[in-house]
């Protein structure tokens, strides 16, 4: 069988400017952040970003790589709002499709099932219908005759998720409490990419957790890359929690252009090992400063 | 009859008002946003609404009713409810959410999306989140910690949570399961029990006058002839709030005395 292992750079090399790309996770939880950093390094722009938005959206906006964001919210969880997404919206530098987060789910599900839309009540009467003039309603063909929102399929050119474990054939395992919508992001995409904290031999995922935790099967994946701390600074339980101190630094990088330059030079204009080394150094400095107090 | 405690804080009054929002709801998920609504939902479950279902704020339902400052290790979980399954609950109607509102208007439309024109907002907020789907599928209430003409507005800048006028205009599929039950602010409790579902002052919190409420509201409220004070916690409720549900007084951070 096919060995789907690839490097981060090989995966990102498949992206082209102008693509519609989806990122798994939720807010500042289990985001494929190493992939986001690799996209920043490659400078692939003009992207339509589809996400239960967190710092993935913010970083891509800050780097000027975003044409449009499709979202129900963008948040850092412990910090309510992402400064870079806010700035991009307020300066009018990005387009936006803002929908109810359940509509968003149905859009991914419709794409996964290859149907043009799925009906829902969500959205009726709200300004989501006004600010997205392309949205349509559909009348039930049955006796009830109800008029419902026809949430269009959110079809993706590429999707990225970060998981706790995967095997070399592309089966994926989520050991944390919530699989979020990762399976549907992969299902909605033409090219499907998984990064994982650890890649094991086929069949060995059951040594890591019960079969119900292997929610991503290899029908849904094209390539897998092992990237330790690949979700940093977002949370990836049970492997690690969110790095709150680092997230504060990230949020601070939205203060002004200089703050972003400093953050970007230290953490983003380096390769992934360089990023991880810079993070370790920052953490150790903070620990030393605390010990000295 | 026990004399009401004289030192009851506004936050404690509001916690009881929040609890009252879920009275009679039976076996549904109570989803509170904010500290005081969280105290309220737990108080309701420990007193008059024992069948309420509470989440752990992550991906599970919680069998016990710990304090709002409890560590996760204190939670006893009873069932799995990841985000994807939350929508099954929302769309089945077995939920009553108390969301927050940056803006709320006369007919209960709510906004947490942005201030100014959506196309290029003056201030981008979090986004509509689940408000459109919540309001159209199950009972929704709101908690507004800072009641002012900027939060209680004639028209919200972006309708996320759907109010009575907008639901009616969207037709029977929109009104079928729609209910905005109450809006609770730091000044009072409001409902929509009027012929045209315009917002009505149900009660003002002790120490607040009708004039205070009117001055802080950016639209014309329906004011019934006799408006009572919001009820005080009874001794059992006060003890539960202070000793069991919020011993570290997080409520005072959300609503300073």
Image (tube, helix red, strand yellow):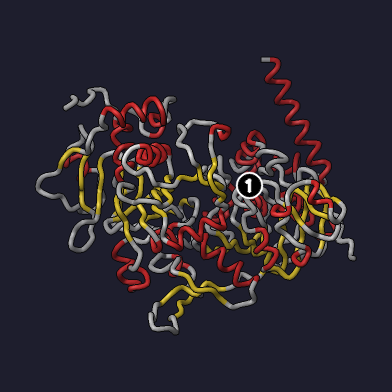
Residue B212 shown left or right of residue B103 in the figure: left
Q: In which quarter of the image is residue A122?
A: bottom left
Viewer-proximal residue, B190 or B211? B190
Picture coordinates of residue B17, whole percent (x, y): 29, 40
Picture coordinates of residue B200, whole percent (x, y): 21, 52
Picture coordinates of residue B47, whole percent (x, y): 33, 38
Relative to A154, residue A286 above or below: above
Chain letter of mark 1 equals A
- Residue at the spot of label 1: A177
> What residue is rendered at 81% in x and 57% in y?
A224
Q: What element carries label 1?
A: loop
Q: Which of the image's four quarters has the C terminus of chain A? A: top right
Viewer-proximal residue, B91 or B37? B91
> What residue is rendered at 79% in x and 39% in y?
A276
Farthest residue toward the left? B225
Residue B137 shown left or right of residue A286 in the figure: left
Residue B134 shown left or right of residue B15 in the figure: right
Picture coordinates of residue A265, whole percent (x, y): 75, 42
> What residue is rendered at 64% in x and 61% in y?
A49
Q: Can residue B62 be seen in this view?
A: yes
Relative to B111, residue B186 above or below: above
Q: Quadrant of residue A194?
A: bottom right
Q: Can residue B147 be seen in this view?
A: no
Relative to A81, residue A89 above or below: below
């Amino acid at each position: 069988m096919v060995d789907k292992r690839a490097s981060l750079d090989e995966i990102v090399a498949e992206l082209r400017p102008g693509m519609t790309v989806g990122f798994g996770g939720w807010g500042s939880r289990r985001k494929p952040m190493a992939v986001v950093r690799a996209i920043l390094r490659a400078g692939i722009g003009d992207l339509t970003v589809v996400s239960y938005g967190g710092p993935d959206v913010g970083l891509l906006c800050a780097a000027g790589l975003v044409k449009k964001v499709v979202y129900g919210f963008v948040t850092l969880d412990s910090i309510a709002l992402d400064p870079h997404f806010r700035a991009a919206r307020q300066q009018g530098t990005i387009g936006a499709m803002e929908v109810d987060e359940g509509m968003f789910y149905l859009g991914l599900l419709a794409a996964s099932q290859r149907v043009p839309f799925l009906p829902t009540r969500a959205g009726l009467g709200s300004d989501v219908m006004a600010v997205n003039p392309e949205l349509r309603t559909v009348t039930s063909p049955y006796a009830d005759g109800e008029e419902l929102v026809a949430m269009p399929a959110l079809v993706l050119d590429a999707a990225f998720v970060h998981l706790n474990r995967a095997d070399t054939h592309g089966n994926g395992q989520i050991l944390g409490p919530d699989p979020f919508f990762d399976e549907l992001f992969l299902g909605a995409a033409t090219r499907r990419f998984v990064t994982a904290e650890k890649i094991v031999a086929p069949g060995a995922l059951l040594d890591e957790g019960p079969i119900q935790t292997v929610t991503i099967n290899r029908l849904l994946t094209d390539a897998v890359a092992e990237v330790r701390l690949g979700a940093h600074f977002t949370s990836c339980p049970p492997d690690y929690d969110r790095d709150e101190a680092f997230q504060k630094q990230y949020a601070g990088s939205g203060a002004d252009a200089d703050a972003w330059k400093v953050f970007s030079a230290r953490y983003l204009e380096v390769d992934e090992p360089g990023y991880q080394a810079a993070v370790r150094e920052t953490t150790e400095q903070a620990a030393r400063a605390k010990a000295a107090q | 009859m026990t004399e009401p405690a004289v030192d009851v804080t506004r936050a404690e009054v509001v916690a009881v008002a929040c609890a009252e929002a879920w009275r009679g709801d039976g076996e549904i998920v109570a989803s509170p946003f904010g500290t005081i609504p969280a105290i309220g939902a737990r108080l309701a479950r420990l007193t008059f609404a024992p069948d309420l279902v509470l989440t752990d704020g992550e991906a599970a339902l919680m069998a016990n009713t710990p304090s709002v400052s409890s560590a996760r290790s204190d939670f006893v979980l009873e069932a799995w409810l990841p985000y994807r399954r939350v929508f099954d609950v929302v769309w089945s109607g077995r939920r009553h959410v108390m969301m927050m509102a940056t803006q709320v208007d006369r007919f209960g439309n709510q906004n947490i999306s942005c201030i100014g024109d959506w196309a290029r907002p003056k201030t981008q907020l979090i986004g509509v989140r689940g408000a459109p789907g919540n309001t159209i599928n199950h009972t929704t209430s709101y908690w507004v910690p800072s009641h002012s003409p900027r939060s209680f507005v004639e028209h919200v800048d972006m309708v996320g949570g759907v109010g009575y006028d907008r639901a009616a205009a969207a037709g029977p599929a929109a009104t079928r399961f729609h209910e905005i039950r109450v809006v609770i602010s730091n000044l009072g409790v409001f409902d929509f029990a009027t012929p045209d579902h315009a917002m009505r002052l149900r009660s003002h919190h002790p120490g607040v006058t009708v004039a205070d409420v009117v001055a802080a509201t950016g639209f014309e409220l329906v004011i019934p002839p006799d408006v009572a004070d919001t009820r005080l916690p009874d001794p059992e409720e006060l003890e539960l709030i202070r000793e069991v549900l919020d011993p570290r007084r997080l409520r005072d951070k959300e609503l300073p005395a």
